[in-house]
Image (cartoon, rainbow, N blue to C red):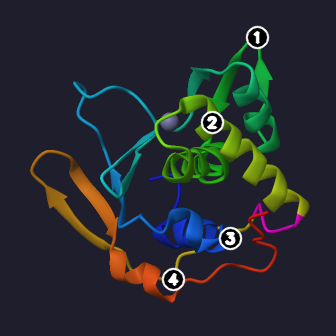
Amino acid sequence: MPCSADDVMRVLSLVPRALWRDLRRVVFRTPTPRECPVDACVWDGTIAINAVRIDEERDVSGAHAQVVRRAGGSVARGVATFDRGVARAFMLYHVLLHEIGHFVEGSDETRAEGFALDWEHRLRRAGAIPFACVWSMPARQGPTRRHGWRERIAGRAFAGLTAAPGGDAS
Ligand SMILES: [Zn+2]
């Protein structure tokens, strides 16, 4: 996985909890080849963050090219190489925020994307991101029948989170 469970908790702690109160769990998983190749998806109170291939080139365009550059990556002719650091920043500071955006904006992709870009800018302005990789909470791990190894962040872990400094929802 490009990011840790604690990294995810840290990002959640930076966004007012009222915006993601319906979130019950975040799951890291490796999708099967048959599943659509997206970075993450959201359903039924769950955000699933998918494994991404490291050191692989991927097509990025428009706002995503800018996200990759802010993540420390370079984009040439619409192609970026996702090393570990770029993948981590892209997943944490964009994809995760996009999925949180679905809890606020519903299924509208444009609005969820706008939410992600808006919150990335806010958190960068506040100096809250980027932050160094956090590994403190041992994630529950185990092989699952369909998805191989994954980590799960249990819903109870959210209980201690409160809105962070600068996490003003206005
Ligand atoms: Zn979406």
Q: Which mark is residue 136?
A: 4
Please give the name of the residue rendered at 53% of the width and 76% of the height, measured from the top-left corner.
135
Residues at marks 1 and 4, CA–CA distance in whole angstroms: 39 Å
Q: CA distance from mark 1 to mark 3?
A: 34 Å
Percent across and percent down for residue 98 are: 58, 45
> Crowding at label 3, few (<14), some or many (≥20) Cα neighbours within 10 Å?
many
Q: CA distance from mark 4 to mark 3?
A: 17 Å
Marks 1/4 in contact by CB < 8 Å: the verdict is no
Compare marks 1 and 4 and give the one earlier in the sequence: 1
| Image x and y of residue 129, in percent | 77, 62
Q: Which mark is residue 111?
A: 2
Mark before the other along the chain sequence, 4 or 3: 3
Q: Secondary structure at mark 4?
A: loop
**Separation of marks 1 and 2 at Cα, in angstroms:** 27 Å
| Magenta part, dominant SS | loop
Amino acid bearing label 2: Arg
- Residue 166 sits in quarter: bottom right
Residue 22: image tag: none
Q: Nearer the viewer, mark 2 or mark 4?
A: 2
Q: Is residue 150 above or below residue 156?
A: above
Left or right: 79 with respect to 22?
Answer: right
Label at residue 77: 1
The magenta region covers 126-130
Q: Residue at x 38, y 27 (%)?
A: 37
Residue occupied by mark 3: 14
